[in-house]
Amino acid sequence: MINDSLLKLNVQLLREVLEFKIPTDALLSKFFRENRKLQFTDRGIIAETVYTILRNYYKLSTAIEIKNTFTLIAYVWLHYLKTPPSELSKLKSIKLAVIETLPRVNENTIEFPEWIKNRLSKNLPEAEIKNLSKAMEQQAPLTLRVNTLKMSVSEVHKVLNAEGIKSELTKFSPFGITLENKADLMRNKLFLDGAIEVQDEASQLAGILLEPKRSEMVVDFCAGSGGKTLLFGMLMKNTGRIYAFDINERRLGNLTPRLARSGLSNVYPQLIESENDSKIKRLHGKIDKVFVDAPCLGLGTLRRNPDLKFRYNEESLLQINEQQLSILSAASKLVKSGGKIVYATCSILREENQDIVEKFLAAESDFRLIDIGQIPVLEKLKLTDSRFLTLSPAVHGTDGFFAAVIEKIT
């Protein structure tokens, strides 16, 4: 229920968010821990208000002074979250008449900073940039991956709908289910039993691209919390061996409960200091498949993390490019002859994607790029360039994602 208390709490949080010093998702987690009495619906209103403002920041700034947080939130509640004026009129902290007379936003405003627009314009026509911006302004769907070691996709689909959680099968991934509305899944038996994991369809497709086989040795080079690691384990039918490497102990620690739920026993998490760690060197030339989910600016996830566009700049891009090439080069030393690497990012910038792959191939003559157009699961995507998996919220309804398959030929 909209009230003055909720408005003031939202203002308190928004002011901290707009400093862009700490990731918004981290601020939200901290805020909700400090306000544990907030109801689930109230948490949803607060979170969606903040994310709506970040997704539409440049539009909103054409109509409102962004620093006027009370007015800004009331404007978003009225025009974006469709709160009835009768509810807003009860608020003492704002004047509805003032909100209603404010100009409407310029819907043609592109929601990218100039430096991102300039980068995109080198490879995309203006119409496609506008479509991409529009898509990034929408709320991302909640997509699940079914753990087929526990249940079939059709079984999970039936259970969800029987529980009143409306859902539909994903268009491209054979393991995905998209929910029509947000749901509190953390207490759901399907989640607790390991039958489902939250994973965007783009991430699922990139993981499938690795095509890990039973009894192979696989490395998830930048495993994070292990979403793709779990997918590999499922595709390998819990056989072979998967090394999950990451430099972040907290992220890697999140894999432990996920592994327990999944039922997998073929995964070996490994905390490393860098891409040149001795734990990696002892595996040189021994690995069948390596997945490199490289650190990136994450601009393909702006629907979920719209604050990223304010927290990075040209200098950030140059720094991450050096890191990406270094990590891909280090990972390449793991694969045996005939082995494969998938290089992937959740970025929409060519500089983090095709350019890194091309620089790597120019320096490493014993590797070649594999055409992925014939992989059955990708045929529906109708890729414009079959050398690369390029996914877009504007075209595919997924996060923005990139992947390429590289094979060692000697």
Image: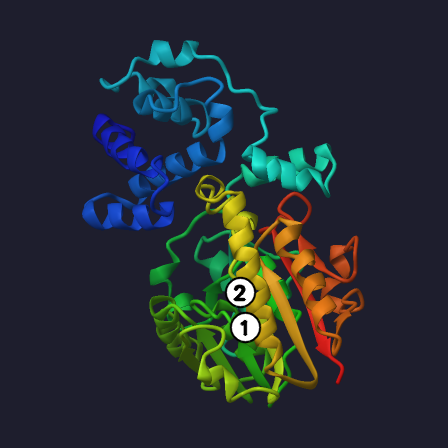
**1 vs 124: above or below:** above
Residue under numbered circle 1 = 231
For the residues marked 1 and 2, what is the alpha-carbon distance in whole angstroms? 8 Å
Q: Give amino acid for label 1.
A: Leu
Left or right, 85 with respect to 196, comes to left
Residue 11: x percent and y percent? 28, 30
Nearer to the camera, 283 or 293: 283
Question: Which residue is at a point 47% across and 30% down the rendered structure image?
Answer: 57
Mark 1 residue crowding within 10 angstroms, few (<14) / some (14–19) / many (20+):
many
In this view, the residue in front, 138 or 146, is 138
Label 1: element kind: helix
Q: Secondary structure at mark 2?
A: strand
Which x, y percent locates residue 92? Answer: 22, 17
Residue 374 left/right relative to 148: right
Q: Is residue 336 left or right of residue 59?
A: right
Answer above or below: position of 127 versus 333.
Answer: above
Q: Using the rendered image of the protein, determine whether residue 272 is visible from the camera's viewpoint.
A: yes
Q: Residue 162: x percent and y percent?
A: 47, 58
Location of the C terminus by quadrant is bottom right
Determine contact: label 1, label 2, CB under 8 Å: yes
Left or right relative to 148: residue 174 = right
Give the mark, 1 or 2, whose residue is nearer the N terminus: 2
Q: Residues within 10 Å of mark 2 (few under 14, many from 20)?
A: many
- Look at mark 2 in the image and give the residue it sits on: 145
Residue 340 location, x and y as percent? 68, 78
Residue at position x 37%, y 47% from top?
23
Task: Give residue 101's quadrant in the image.
Answer: top left
